[in-house]
Amino acid sequence: MGVKGLYSLINCNPELLEPYFLHDETVVIDGWNIAYRLYLGSNLDCVYGGELLAYTDVVRSYFELYKSSNIHCVVLLDGAFEPGAKSSTIMERSRQKITAMRSIRGENASKIKVMPPHASRVFYEVLRDMSHVEVSFCVFEADEFLALEANRRNCVLVSDDSDFFIYDLKKGLIRLNSISSYTVERMIDGQQVTGLECSIYKIEKLLRRFGKNFNPDLLPIFGAIVGNDFVAQNAFSNFFNTIRVPRRVNLRYNPPHAILVAMLNFLSTQWNVEQCTRVIMRCVPYTPKDRREKLSKLLADGIARYRMEYGVNVKVQFRDGTNVPDWLLRKHIEGNLSCTVITVIATGIMYLDVRVEALHLRSSHLVTLPMRKNLYRILFKNRAQCITELDRSGNDLRFTDVEFSEGEIGLEQIPRLNAAKRLEFLKQCCFVQTSCADLVSCHGGKLLVWTMEYTVFHGHYDWTFIVCIIIMCITSQALGAQCFEESVSYLLGQAIDSNEVQHLKKFFRKPLKTHIVNLKLTHRINEFAGCLRMVRTFNDLIGVYQKPFKFYLALIFRVHTHVKMWQRISLLIFMAILSYVILMWRTSLLTEDADMYFPDDVEEDLEFYSDDY
């Protein structure tokens, strides 16, 4: 969530923090908070799909610091969007991204800082393979579950989210940006100990600035009404007009913090939550009645969240009130299913993230609309035939109703499918028309081939782009391999040693700050990334292949700009062209029977999305 202005208020009063030496203990970590900070703070490219291999090294190196200090990490990640909550915040953040995209019109894009679409998945997969890290997803917003888990384990919480400044954390909060980037050694009780220097915050220090009788049970009211991701700051403006900052307050603040200080001073004069709530609601006009009732519910829900009561025994339901199958929810919590699936089920809305692309081009999500319709057929079988999507349209956002036909297989039928039927159903969902993937022995490689096949048929790309995709797949697998078994090419089934691709280091260099963005190539990479995400979502949902595959989308751009330098990349170019020839040869053998994979209501979509820009 995040209480607006509270983070900077704490920065104005650094004495509220104490030095702390982190070592030989357990910590609970706000997963997405650190995932974003590691990527955006590492000067990695955000335009051409992201530098995911470099991000893998950044994440692994950072958490190795905790391992060196004998610290066990419990990482919790935000899950799906809650129904009826944060919609305005989601739209606001999407519009902020659109505003940032305006600088990509042929100019350098080095200032654009947007998390790449697949970076969150990479973050999770890296942590899952680390022995000293426990990682899992929450059903919805993770904040209160993070606080609950920290108190249950009696350990500190690590985050930069300002919400946690007002949670009742037994052991306190360690600010993420206060943790040193290297380990140090100290003598503690006669023993040399390795640890991390940082700063810790405890709520008691803040409350003492407003008197000894400040009731900490009132802090949830503070977080609920001063403004966060769920409540606009002006929602209780009538009440704020009745309170003032005291003439003398033992706290440094700037003018934007006046409301926060005045609210804390007001709470210091109240006795309990019920009395304080009545005083606040007394300032809300009685008309219109529905607005008063809405504000009352917002206040009650906000208090419950900060009391860590809101998410107890949380359930996910369809819009008709029926519960989501347990196996689906379990997949989501274990990180084996995209959060988008639960969001669509719970809210009835598909929130399509804003990509880094030129605003005068159509949204890169349009190419995957046929796939998304197949997803809706599975999720809403016998429940709905229309869903709402929020996507970029030019310089703004647009809600669109998407209709789809009734599907034959839904969530209730998937657990009863045998392996052969699951595979056949997965192929239908991904519009597989050829048998190209039969040439590939690696399971993850089959998914990549299906993605490239969908890209070939439903986009309008030249052969150089497809070759670059194939080179990216081979190179990423070789360089990202942690063992010999992982070094097998996903396309030709050959083992490729990472040394064979070391001469490709040139193509891993970050673009210069003066680099002019290739708008069409950026758009094509985004389309491919979207197809890749949908294929993985179907595979996770249906449960066919287990082994993930590695990819490095930014490499497509590097190779594409030097694809004529055959002598530098002769081996991989040869393999890529061979794979491409096989793909095209297989395509030429298509028969009319392939039409069985296309439902009637998407044929027009496929024809439309094959148009050039």
Image (cartoon, rainbow, N blue to C red):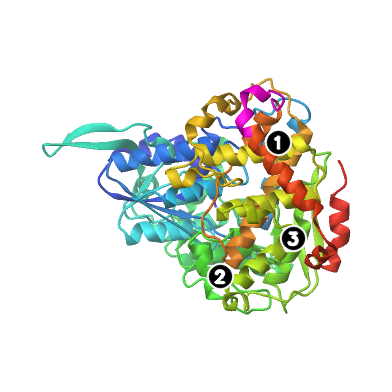
> Was residue 339 drawn as part of the magenta stretch in this picture?
no
How far across and how far down the image is residue 294, in percent?
Answer: 66, 67
Write down the residue under mark 1. 100
* Residue 563 is covered by the magenta coloring: yes
Amino acid type at mark 1: Ala
Give the x, y percent position of residue 309: 46, 67
Label 3 environment density (alpha carbons within 10 Å; few <14, some 14–19, many ≥20): many
Please name the residue shown 27% across and 44% down the image.
Answer: 70
In front: mark 3 or mark 1?
A: 3
Q: Is residue 425 left or right of residue 225?
A: right
**Residue under the point 52% across and 75% down:** 326
Judging by the rendered image, the residue that carries numbered circle 2 is 328
Q: CA distance from mark 3 to mark 2?
A: 23 Å
Mark 1 vs mark 2, CA separation in Å: 36 Å
Placement of 428 over or under 446, stated as above or below = below
Residue 190 visible? The answer is yes
Q: Amino acid at mark 2?
A: Leu
For mark 2, does the 10 Å Cα neighbourhood hold few (<14), some (14 to 19), or many (20 or more) residues? some
Closer to us: mark 1 or mark 2? 2
Query: Which of these two is toward me, 193 or 126?
Result: 126
Residue type pointed to by label 3: Phe
Mark in front: 3 vs 2 = 3
Q: Earlier in the sequence, mark 3 or mark 2?
A: 2
Q: Nearer the viewer, residue 222 or 43?
A: 43
Q: Where is residue 587? Give x, y as percent.
A: 78, 52
Q: Nearer the viewer, residue 367 or 289?
A: 367
Question: Which contiguous range is marked in magenta?
Answer: 562-572
Q: Is residue 453 above or below residue 552?
A: below
Residue that appears at 77% across and 33% down: 519
